[in-house]
Amino acid sequence: MNTTEVGAGAPGAPIVKVEERLFQNRYLVDAGRPHIRIKPHTEPSKALMALTHLCPAGCYSQNDKGQVEAVVDGCVECGTCRVLTAKTGEVEWNYPRGGFGVLFKFG
Ligand code: SF4
């Protein structure tokens, strides 16, 4: 068992890190057509900044100018960023085109 720390599942089931589970997924990247875009900004809101910590796939980061950037190739389409920035409107969110995006593996 290559596991540690916390996890969820049936009693007695192995505990697996989130990162290890995410590694099982596969993605078909729609090159040049990201399904999530951040609107141009000079200073990110607190909600947008929070995504640098809250996105489970680590898609958001802060650049050296203090702006938040997104690389959504590993997005699991959880919608956290969509909900968190609903009031600020900083994120333009769509599902990937058919056939693209995440392919979940549950094995
Ligand atoms: S939908 Fe979820 S996984 Fe995808 S970029 Fe937003 S927070 Fe990250």
Image: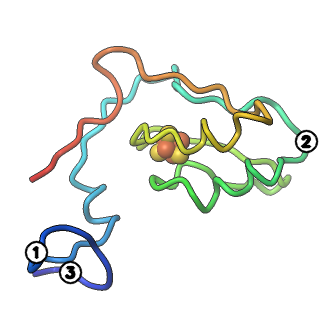
Mark 1 neighbour density, 10 Å: few (under 14) some (14–19) many (20 or more): few
Q: Residue furthest top?
A: 98
Residue bearing mark 2? 42
Q: Earlier in the sequence, mark 3 or mark 2?
A: 3
Residue 68 image point, x, y percent: 74, 48
Mark 3 neighbour density, 10 Å: few (under 14) some (14–19) many (20 or more): few
Residue bearing mark 3? 3
Does 47 sit left or right of 58 as displayed?
Answer: right
Q: Is residue 45 above or below residue 28?
A: below
**Location of the N terminus (image quadrant):** bottom left
User: Disc 3 on helix, strand or loop?
Assistant: loop
Which of pointers 3 and 1 indicates the residue nearer the eye? 1
User: Disc 2 on helix, strand or loop?
Assistant: loop
Residue 18 image point, x, y percent: 33, 65
Residue depicted at 13% across the width and 69% down the height:
10
Q: Earlier in the sequence, mark 1 or mark 2?
A: 1
Does 78 sit left or right of 37 as displayed?
Answer: left
**Identity, as a three-letter code, of the amino acid under mark 2:** Thr
Tell me the distance, in whole angstroms, between the alpha carbons under discs 1 and 2. 47 Å
**Identity, as a three-letter code, of the amino acid under mark 3:** Thr
